[in-house]
Amino acid sequence: MKTLVLATTNKNKLREFKEILQDFDIDIKSLSDFGPIPEIIEDGATFDDNAYKKAHQTARFLGIPAIADDSGLEVEALEGAPGVYSARYASENATDEENCDKLLKNMAEVKNRKAKFVCVISIAVPSGPALTYKGECPGLITKERCGANGFGYDPVFFYEEFGKTFAEASSEQKNNVSHRGKALKEIKDEANKISVWLDQKLYEEKPEKPDHNEFMQNDWSE
Ligand code: ITT
């Protein structure tokens, strides 16, 4: 069985990955199974850029294939904001509540409440090649926070088919329709192809030991 390390510091993402990939025949390890890795600066302009950066730099540092998710909320009336800044919309170390409250404030007078969650997942090997998977989920921004499940913007994301927010839905309901659920379903459907691709890429690349000094100097340049 192949092993992939999931490059995320977000415990809720880790939980959703584990729930959705329960019967996946690739072994997903978390970062806590390894020692600490240097912080990865998410300065990409797109979800694709950041997902690849997280997966590739983790794979390079640990010397094994990695999988990473970059995701966020795009609000139509705010021209796609908070987008790639979703995790730090209210401030650099903002809490989920602070981000939701800033969004509700910015949307207070806005009629068009349409939004979508976007998730890009990258699977990368240490030498650089990667596979990319995407999922989107449309919804509406509420007027106030509702519900206590989930994380991030779930309390302000109204999913019309459920008639409630993601934070009022069960994790099973959310995972069935969510951006992350859709991207991970594609990955599950392609498990055999991914396994063959990983064999091929790992065979092609020279097995060299990762140079940790390079990372200690904070040189993450590609
Ligand atoms: P990692 O980079 O370590 O994976 P992170 O939380 O910083 O963790 P992102 O940079 O991808 O992850 O930011 C994602 C943010 O988008 C997240 O913090 C939430 O605010 C929001 N978000 C993403 N998926 C979500 C979901 O399923 N439900 C609610 N909010 C979500």
Image (tube, grey):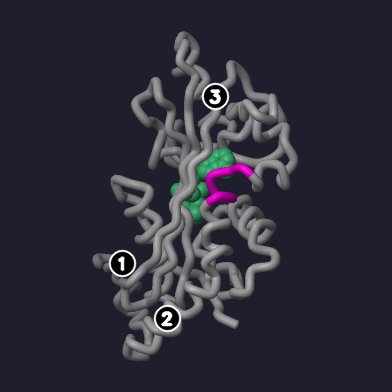
The mark found on residue 183 in the picture is none
How far apart are the two marked residues, 3 and 2, measured between alpha carbons? 41 Å
Q: Amino acid at mark 1?
A: Asn
Q: Is residue 201 magenta?
A: no
The majority secondary structure of the magenta stretch comes to helix
Q: Amino acid at mark 3?
A: Leu
Location of residue 210 (image quadrant):
bottom left
Left or right of residue 130, residue 9 in this image: right
Q: Which residues are magenta?
A: 177-182
Tell me which label, 3 or 2, sits earlier in the chain: 2
Indicate which label's residue lies in the foreground, 1 or 3.
3
Residue for badge 2: 63
How far apart are the two marked residues, 1 and 3, measured between alpha carbons? 40 Å
The mark found on residue 140 in the picture is 3
How far apart are the two marked residues, 1 and 2, measured between alpha carbons? 17 Å
Mark 2 element type: loop
**How far across and how far down the image is residue 37, in percent?**
46, 69
